[in-house]
């Protein structure tokens, strides 16, 4: 994340990057500013996890939804524990990851007993926790956090504390109006996580099965649960390369948005395709489900029509379009991601072949009624939702 700032250094008493960037930063509202240190205190990790304990780490966060996607059993170092009486975290504490591109986590009762990596900065506030969480996760809050990160890297021996960053402090009546909205967003973030890694062994006959499936799970019968995805899909589309027409990061008139892996992860359109490119021959259609061709933790979304299908994703057109939200929800669920991971196991580039996509097991859950507004797969990214709530 790069946020250029131009500052006139004439007459400045020093070149302290933290002060200069903070003074040059402009928020979209004219509220009084407070430093985080005025409203929050830092909590330090004082618990040592047992071997094999599952720990929430920054790399396990979901940048799009703001939730915890997965945990690791290989963490080394001190941790926080949610609910530990004296030194632990409690509901309402905030976990700030070291990278500004990752979301700040709001600790909830659902995390009771969880272990959290000490690489987070844990903040405790007396009040207005949801407001601070929202501001730090907003696009402007992430830019401010990025400036602090840059300052830390630029001043060797002079680490800039997160507590020095200044954020807008809304009047009480504004906070009362949006408090419940922010709490509703926080409640919606809580969802299924990926299966945690486990160790196992068994004896099996490999003569009549694929090695990658036999080695992927202690219960290979899971692969036969449900029915193949091919029963639902009328057409599969995957993008093509075009060396004659390059994609751009900024749109020109007539350019088409590209549905790629980056868009799946963040919800942000990052690349644009000229209409004369051969790539533009493959576009998403109404109620297409787009899923990633690479990686085990990628999202599936119900895509808008008119997006160019990139080679890093598959676009699936269903026989029954009404099932698209249900299929996206299933592919993003713990079971769906687990089935996807099984298909990836053993492949060198961690990708799904077309055959694997066709044979991916789905269950009857795809037929369950879906409240489209409640399906996180097709919600706007967290930062966009906060932008509309905080500043309007």
Image (spheres, rainbow, N blue to C red):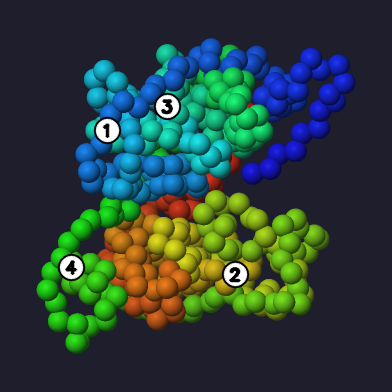
Task: Name which of mark 4 and mark 1 comes first in the sequence.
Answer: 1
- CB of mark 3 within 8 Å of CB of mark 2? no
* Residue 57 place in picture, x, y as percent: 39, 42
Q: CA distance from mark 2 to mark 1?
A: 44 Å
**Which quarter of the rendered picture does the C terminus lie within?**
top right
The residue carrying pointer 3 sits among few (fewer than 14), some (14 to 19) or many (20 or more) residues within 10 Å by Cα, namely many
The residue carrying pointer 2 sits among few (fewer than 14), some (14 to 19) or many (20 or more) residues within 10 Å by Cα, namely many
Q: Is residue 144 visible?
A: no
Task: Name which of mark 3 and mark 2 comes first in the sequence.
Answer: 3
Check disc 2 and report the residue beneath it.
310
Check disc 3 and report the residue beneath it.
122
Check disc 4 and report the residue beneath it.
219
Q: CA distance from mark 3 to mark 2?
A: 39 Å
* Residue 237 place in picture, x, y as percent: 53, 76
Instruction: Kindly identify the residue that appears in the image at 20 percent across and 58 percent down.
Output: 199
Q: Is residue 139 visible?
A: yes
Circle 3 or circle 1, nearest the eye: 1
Circle 2 or circle 1, nearest the eye: 1
Decide: is 381 above or below 324: above
Numbered circle sitting on residue 364: none
Task: Name which of mark 4 and mark 3 comes first in the sequence.
Answer: 3
Q: Secondary structure at mark 4?
A: loop
Instruction: Kindly identify the residue that appears in the image at 81 percent across and 32 percent down.
Output: 6
Check disc 1 and report the residue beneath it.
48
Q: CA distance from mark 4 to mark 3?
A: 39 Å
- CB of mark 4 within 8 Å of CB of mark 3? no
């Amino acid at each position: 994340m790069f946020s250029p700032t131009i500052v006139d250094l004439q007459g400045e008493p020093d070149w302290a990057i933290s002060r200069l960037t903070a003074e040059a930063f402009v928020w979209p509202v004219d509220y009084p500013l407070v430093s985080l240190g005025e409203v929050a205190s830092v909590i330090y990790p004082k618990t040592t996890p047992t071997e094999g304990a599952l720990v929430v780490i920054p790399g396990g966060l979901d940048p799009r939804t703001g939730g915890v996607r997965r945990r690791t059993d290989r963490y080394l170092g001190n941790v926080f524990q949610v609910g530990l009486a004296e030194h632990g975290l409690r509901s309402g504490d905030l976990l700030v990851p070291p990278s500004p591109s990752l979301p700040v986590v709001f600790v909830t009762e659902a995390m009771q007993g969880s272990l959290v990596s000490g690489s987070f900065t844990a903040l405790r506030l007396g009040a207005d926790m949801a407001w601070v969480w929202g501001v730090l996760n907003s696009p402007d809050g992430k830019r401010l956090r990025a400036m602090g990160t840059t300052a830390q890297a630029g001043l060797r021996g002079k680490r800039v504390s997160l507590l020095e960053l200044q954020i807008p402090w809304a009047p009480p009546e504004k906070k009362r109006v949006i408090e419940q909205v922010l709490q509703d967003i926080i409640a919606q973030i809580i969802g299924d996580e990926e299966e945690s890694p486990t160790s196992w062994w068994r004896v099996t006959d490999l003569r009549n099965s694929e090695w990658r499936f036999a080695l992927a799970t202690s219960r290979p019968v899971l692969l036969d649960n449900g029915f193949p995805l091919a029963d639902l899909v009328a057409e599969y589309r995957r993008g093509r390369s075009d060396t004659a027409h390059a994609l751009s990061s900024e749109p020109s008139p007539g350019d088409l948005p590209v549905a790629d892996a980056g868009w799946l992860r963040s919800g942000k359109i990052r690349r644009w395709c000229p209409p004369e490119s051969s790539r533009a021959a493959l576009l998403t259609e109404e109620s297409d489900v787009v899923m990633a061709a690479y990686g085990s933790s990628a999202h599936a979304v119900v895509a808008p029509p008119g997006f160019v299908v990139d080679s890093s994703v598959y676009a699936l057109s269903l026989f029954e379009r009404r099932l698209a939200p249900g299929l996206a929800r299933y592919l993003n669920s713990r079971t769906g991601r687990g089935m996807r991971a099984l298909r990836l196991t053993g492949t060198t580039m961690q990708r799904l072949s077309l055959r694997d996509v066709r044979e991916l097991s789905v269950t009857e859950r795809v037929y369950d009624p879906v409240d489209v507004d409640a399906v996180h797969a097709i919600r706007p990214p967290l930062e966009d939702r906060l932008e509309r709530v905080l500043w309007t």
